[in-house]
Structure formats: structure tokens, C-alpha cells
């Protein structure tokens, strides 16, 4: 019965939160150069590389690829407004600006950006509730953006 349940869950695409989602980096050694200055992003990238079967390395001499995180950012904009002019929904965007080079310094992915977005309803609790919800969503969007980044790295193989 347990095997049947596991098969059913895997067949529908269900996976544990944080699971690499089928991304495989096949033991690629990746150095991460953090120009973005975000320890949370660097931690998330390191965890994702290791979770996808890659090897995180501090040494450029040992790396197959050098992933440079040039920057990151998040922004919020109004997504919808009610008839009375009050904001109903916001759209939060998290962006990672990055590039990838191989061990010889040849560019594999030119400097580019990827975005993850989510729309959320304005919480009833006011500004403090909105900031708390934005912080929670930013963590989720960072994880989403890193998953997209891992898929792009996988495509380099």
C-alpha cells in the first residue's frame, strides 16, 4: 500500500518542498561568485546545487563552471485597485542577475536576468501585515528563481 501511495504521488507531480524538482547537475563542480552580496541567495543557490547533484566549490581551479550572481532585487507594484481606489492586490517580483562561464573563462550564459512573480491580496491587518506577507513571499520567490536558475544550468550540460 505504501508503494502504491508513493507511485500515485510521484505520478501526479507531487514532491517535498525544497526537493530539486528533477534537476540534475551530474556532479558538475560549480563555483559561485557573489557580487549580489546576499547571504540568503548564496545559501539558497548552494543548497540547490547540492540538491541537484552538483558540487559547490570555493575554488575556481576546481570548478567546471563559474556562476556569477551580479545582483538581485525585489519590487512590489499595485496589481489591482477597487472601485473606491483602495489597493486590492499587489504583485511582488524577485530578480536574479547572473552569468555563467566555463573553466576556461568562456562565457556559457551571458549576463542576463530571471524573474519570479507572485500576486497577493492586500492583507486586512495593514502595513505591518503586508510587510510580513511580502517577506514570506520574497523567500518563496527567491527559491522559485533559484529553481529556474538550476534548470538553466542543467541545460548547459
Image (tube, grey):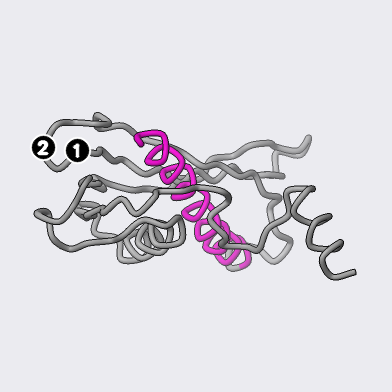
Pick the residue in front: 30 or 87.
30
Magenta-drawn stretch, dominant element (helix, strand or loop): helix
Q: Label 1: which residue?
A: 101
Relative to residue 99, is residue 144 drawn left or right? right
In the image, residue 46 sits, relative to residue 63, either above or below, namely below
Residue 11: x and y, percent? 78, 48
Residue 148: x and y, percent? 47, 42
* Residue 132 part of the magenta segment: yes
Pick the residue in front: 147 or 125.
147
Pick the residue in front: 43 or 105.
105
Residue pictured at 74% horizontal, 61% vertical: 124
Pointer 2 with pointer 1, Cβ within 8 A: yes
Residue reaching furthest right?
A: 1
* Residue 107 part of the magenta segment: no
Name the secondary structure under disc 1. strand
In the image, residue 77 sits, relative to residue 51, either above or below, namely above
Which mark, residue 105? Answer: 2
Q: CA distance from mark 2 to mark 1?
A: 5 Å
Residue 71: x and y, percent? 27, 46
Q: Residues within 10 Å of mark 2 (few under 14, many from 20)?
A: few
Residue pictured at 68% horizontal, 36% vertical: 80
Question: Residue 105 falls in which quadrant of the image?
Answer: top left
Q: Quadrant of the C terminus?
A: top left
Q: Which residues are magenta?
A: 129-157
Amino acid at each position: 500500500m505504501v508503494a502504491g501511495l508513493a507511485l500515485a504521488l510521484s505520478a501526479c507531480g507531487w514532491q517535498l518542498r525544497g526537493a530539486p524538482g528533477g534537476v540534475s547537475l551530474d556532479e558538475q563542480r560549480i563555483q559561485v561568485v557573489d557580487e549580489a552580496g546576499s547571504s540568503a541567495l548564496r545559501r539558497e543557490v548552494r543548497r540547490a546545487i547540492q540538491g541537484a547533484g552538483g558540487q559547490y566549490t570555493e575554488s575556481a581551479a576546481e570548478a567546471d563552471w563559474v556562476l556569477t550572481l551580479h545582483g538581485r532585487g525585489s519590487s512590489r507594484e499595485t496589481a489591482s485597485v477597487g472601485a473606491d481606489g483602495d489597493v486590492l492586490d499587489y504583485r511582488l517580483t524577485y530578480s536574479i542577475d547572473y552569468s555563467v562561464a566555463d573553466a576556461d573563462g568562456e562565457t556559457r550564459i551571458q549576463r542576463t536576468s530571471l524573474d519570479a512573480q507572485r500576486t497577493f491580496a492586500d492583507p486586512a491587518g495593514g502595513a505591518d501585515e503586508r510587510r510580513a506577507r511580502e517577506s514570506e513571499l520574497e523567500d518563496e520567490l527567491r527559491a522559485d528563481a533559484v529553481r529556474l536558475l538550476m534548470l538553466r544550468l542543467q541545460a548547459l550540460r
